[in-house]
Image: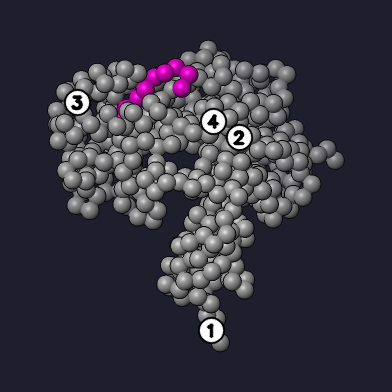
Amino acid sequence: MKQKAPVKVNDLIDIEFVDLTHQGQGVAKLDGYPIFVPNGLPGEKATVKVVKAKKNYAHGELINIIERSPVRVDIPKEEEHKYGGCQIHHMTYDGQLKFKQNHVEQVLVRIGGLEDVKVHPIIGMDNPWHYRNKAQEPVGEKNGKLISGFYKPRSHEIVPTDESVIQMKEVNDAIQVVKEVCNEFKIQAYDEKNHTGILRNIMARYGKQTGELMVVLITRTEKLPNKDEIVEKLVARLPKVKSIVQNINSEKTNVILGKKTKLLWGEEVIYDKIGDVKFRISPLSFYQVNPVQTKVLYDKALEYADLSGEEIVIDAYCGIGTISLFLAQKAKKVYGVEIVPEAIDDARKNAKLNGMTNVEFEVGESETVIPKWAEKGIQADVLVVDPPRKGCDESLLKTIIEMKPKKVVYVSCNPSTLARDLRILEDGGYKTIEVQPVDMFPHTSHVECVVLMSRVEK
C-alpha cells in the first residue's frame, strides 16, 4: 500500500522543534516524519501551517510560538528588511555559535566517522555586525523609483532595504548614493521578464584597511544615459571612492556579472590588506568578504602549517593568492594552482605587489598540475586546500595520498564535504589532528573550518 504523508497542505498543527538543518531551518518530527520550518528553534513548541507535503517530508510556516527558546531574538517587523540573507538572525549570537559548533562536531562523526578528533571552540566575532566588505544588490522599481535589496526566499521579488545589518556602513552608503543619483537621471531598472531597462545590479567593494571604495554599475546596455554627470555626482557624494566601473551583462541570465567591464572613473582596482599582505581587488576578484575573520582563519592555517622557512608548500585552490602569499611569508617556496586564468593573473600581480619572489602560480586543475610538478621533483612538505562548497575533487585527494606530504591543512566552507574528504584522506594514511571552526558569516548558517592533518608513518 502506498505510504501517505501524515499531513496535508494548509493543515494547522502543533509541533515541537528538535533540531536545526544546516540551513538553519527548524526540524520537527511527527512519528518520525520530518517537517522543516524557517525560524523555528530547537526546544520550541509552535503552531505551524503546512505549505508543502511530500511522502517523506513537509515544509511549514511558523504561525505562532507556544513555548519560546531562551536563545530567540525578536526582530521588529519594520526591521526585518535589514536582515536579507541572514537565515539564523532570530537566535542570540551565543546561540548561533553553539549551533555551528554542534553542526561541525555532528557531521564529522556522522559523515566522516571521526569520533576522537579534537574540535576547538568556534572563534566568533567581538562585533558580529556590519562585517561584509562587498555587496551586490539586484535593482527594481517601486512607485517610479529605483529600489535595491535582496530576493524573498524562493522568488525574484526584491525586498527593498536601505541598510543591511551585515554589510559595512561604507558599502550600504555607496549603494544608497548610487540609487539616489540614478533616480535623479531617471535611469530605468532592469526588467527581467521583458529583458528591458538598464540598471541590473549595484555592487560596492570596500578595503577595510585602506579605506578605498569601488562602485560597479551592472547594466543590460553598454549605453548608460548621462554617464558623465552620474559619475561626477558619485565622486562628489562618495569621498572614499577610488574606482567607478560599469559592467555590461546583456544576457538573459541569473548570473550577475557580464564579460565586459569598462572603467568610468579612477583606478581599475582598489587595494586592501590582510595582516601585512596587500591585495589588489578588481570587480571580478574573489576576495573574502569578512576581513576581520579572514585574518583569524589565515593565521590559524599558518599556525597549522608550522613553517620554519625550509618548507615547500603547495596551495591547491589558490584563487588570487590570498593564502599562498600569507604562507609565503614563512615558507621557502609556495606553488599555487587554480583553474581560473583571471585569478592566477591576479595572484601573480599580488605577489609582485608584495615583492614576494618565492611564489609560483600555474593555471590548471590541481589533480593535473600537481603530478606534473612531482615529475619535476617538486615535493610538498605541506599541502593546503581551500576548495569550493562541493569539496575537493576525488582525483585531487588521490593525488595528495600518492604525493604523501607530511601535513595537509584543509580550509573548508562546508562541514559536510569536509567530513567526507577527511574520511578519504584518513583511509589513505592521514590522521586528523585538530579542527578549528571560525564564524566567518555571523547571522547566516555558514561556518568555516581549518583542519590540520598529519601523515601517519607506517
Residue 389 is situated, as x and y percent measured from the top left of the image, at: 54, 45
Q: Is residue 413 left or right of residue 79?
A: right
> Nearer the viewer's eye, disc 4 or disc 2?
4
- Decide if residue 114 is in sight here: yes
Q: Residue furthest right?
A: 458
The residue beneath circle 2 is 124
Q: Which residue is mark 4?
A: 127
Q: Which amino acid type corresponds to the residue marked 2 in the rendered image? A: Gly
Q: Secondary structure at mark 2?
A: loop
| Earlier sequence position, callout 2 versus callout 3 | 2
- Residue depicted at 41% across the width and 25% down the height: 206
Span colored in magenta:
208-216
Residue 385 numbered mark, or none? none
Which residue, given by chain and number where applicable, does mark 3 sit on?
230
Residue 1: % across, % down: 56, 87
Q: Which mark is residue 2?
A: 1
